[in-house]
Amino acid sequence: MAALRHEDEIATVIRVLEEFRRFDPDMPIQYALSFLTIAQNEGLSMGDLAQRLGIAQSSASRNIAALSRWHSFGKDGHDLVEAQEDPRERRRKIVSLTARGHRLVGALRALVSGEAVGAAFAPETSTRPAAKPRRGAPLDLAPTSSSS
């Protein structure tokens, strides 16, 4: 029985990783780990993120840039997190989820708990072609419209 449960847990991890890949087929695992760490510890600083992940602060900053609205060189980011100046210590940047990031966390929680999720996981502004889903329904990160 324990082996079956173990296989189910691994299958869940695989589904979560596949959903990140559907979101961005080229997303490095370090971006996904950074996002998930921020989701668990919203409001931590970039330095704290680097320490928790065991990476250099410059790498944490680069990961946050990719997950933010604007990546580098004017390139669109994923718009999942935002970094703001800490009002008590202006050199520190505090990282939190955007509305889109909260939607992704909700969709991942639904996936892990086995609930049905929506139909589109690809970013609204992506210029990359969407990856073809191999199985299961991709997650819906599109903002919900309150007016028709």
Image (spheres, rainbow, N blue to C red):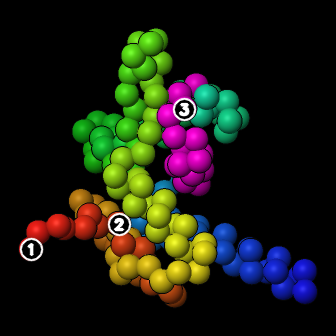
The residues bearing labels 2 and 3 have C-alpha atoms spaced at a distance of: 24 Å
Query: Which is nearer the eye, 85 or 68?
Result: 85
Q: Is residue 66 visible?
A: no
- Kind of residue at badge 2: Leu
Region in magenta: 29-47
With 29 as the anchor, is 19 left or right in this view?
left
Mark 1 / mark 2, whichever is N-terminal? 2
Q: Which residue is mark 1?
A: 148
Query: Which is nearer the eye, 23 or 148?
Result: 148
Seen at 53% across and 28% down, the residue is 45
Name the residue furthest front: 146
Q: Which residue is mark 3?
A: 44
With 145 as the anchor, is 2 left or right in this view?
right
- Kind of residue at badge 3: Leu
Q: Quadrant of residue 24?
A: bottom left
Q: Which residue is mark 2?
A: 141
